[in-house]
Image (tube, rainbow, N blue to C red):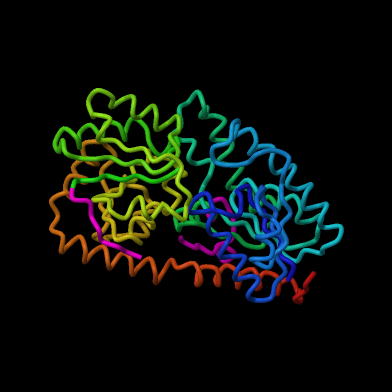
Amino acid sequence: MNIGILTHEPFFPPSGGGSSQAIYLVEEMARRGHAVHLFAPQRDDVAGLEARFGIKIHPFTAWQMGRYTSLRNLKYLAYPIFLERLVNKTARDVKFDVLLAQHAISCVAAGRLRSRLGCAVAMNFLDYLTGYFDSWPKYLAPPALVSRLKHFELSLPLKFQAEGIFTISDELSDLFQTDGYPAKRILPVYYQPTFRTSPTPLVVMHGSLDHHHINDFGAQAMLRIFEKCPGTKFRFVGKKTVALTRTLEMVKGRIPNSSIECTGFVPYADVAGKIHDATVGIVPYAPSTGAHCTMVAKTVEYAAMGVPMVCTPLRGTMRYWGGNPVIRFSEMNPDSFAEKVLGWFNEPLANRHAWGRSASAKVQAELDWQPFSRRVVERLENIHGGRGGTTTKN
């Protein structure tokens, strides 16, 4: 097949847990003999990456794209229009069999191209992007606008008659089914321990640290943890964003600067070195439709390293981890969250290590990228075969 992959994130190096998926997908596609065309805002070493992965990269260069770029949301809104033009231009010389869109932003472009190019379209929802706006400040995300955006995102597969979709969680799959998309066309695809725990209680959080990740809730929980255990250290792994800065302002004067470490941006390949010695990994997400509809990638990172964790009661994450002892879910209040974190400080090491090894094994068995990529590419091949297609290369 000729497969076009559309994404709004740079291909390499990956900028986060979700974006790292594309690397394994293209490797599996190339291994199975498919011709892969990647449309992405990839600016660096394009020729080298094409040779390394055996693919053709069509770089988007109209403007800088990324999680921390200025005017990010406006650029996200405009990106599908320009991405569509880029694919259209390439389609003059390449007949695409399947377009795979990564994230909702690219799904818009892929959907609009489906009938024009006469190809199948699969949409990969690695999160419920607009659902996260539920927990953003209202001046940044007016509720009426957010409601319309959320409905638009859920409507994409039906609106454009996508042949198949992938979802990051069963919770998100349920929402698409409720909106009328056939269950048979949905495939949920959910995302090496060291066990070297810091001698001082160390609470670690990794992520893009946006408004729905860290906010008043996180600040209040930090204060309660530090009040009861003044020796606690906090480490934030990720860019020092507006949301993180605002959170740290709330604890200023009550938690000393020496107890808080902000690493700044860390390349995804190096993140493990910043979380492996945590006493507890935390996911203090505010409740939102987006947060409920993901299986939080941070929990996978912590579990892979054998790090115990505490998470707010997010439905998609709770459904995946169930009663696994390596993760404890708080109530939706800072006192409960703090108590769950403090509870890990006194947990016997034998328990921590046993539960950590078990959780790490679960990640390796169920979420390893190779079987994950196989399931996705096999579904794409079935979609193509169901349309009476034969394998083509270009």
372 part of magenta stretch: no
Q: Quarter holding the N terminus? A: bottom right
In the picture, measured across the screen, residue 181 lies left or right of residue 34, that is left
Compared to residue 103, the image places residue 189 above or below, namely below
x then y, percent, for residue 284: 33, 41
- Which secondary structure class fits the magenta region best? loop
Q: Nearer the viewer, residue 332 or 362?
A: 362
x then y, percent, for residue 372: 51, 68
Determine the residue positioned at 81% across, 64% down: 95
In the picture, measured across the screen, residue 118 lies left or right of residue 339, that is right
In the picture, measured across the screen, residue 137 lies left or right of residue 305, that is right
Determine the residue positioned at 64% across, 55% down: 101
x then y, percent, for residue 163: 67, 62
Write down the region rendered in magenta: 177-199
Compared to residue 244, the image places residue 128 above or below, namely below
188 part of magenta stretch: yes
Q: Quarter holding the C terminus? A: bottom right
Q: Nearer the viewer, residue 128 or 33?
A: 33
Which image quadrant is residue 207 in?
top left
x then y, percent, for residue 196: 25, 58
Q: How many numbered discs?
A: 0
Report the residue that reaches farthest toward the right.
92
Q: Nearer the viewer, residue 379 or 210?
A: 210
Which image quadrant is residue 360 in?
bottom left
Determine the residue positioned at 18% across, 42% down: 339
Compared to residue 168, the image places residue 36 above or below, namely below
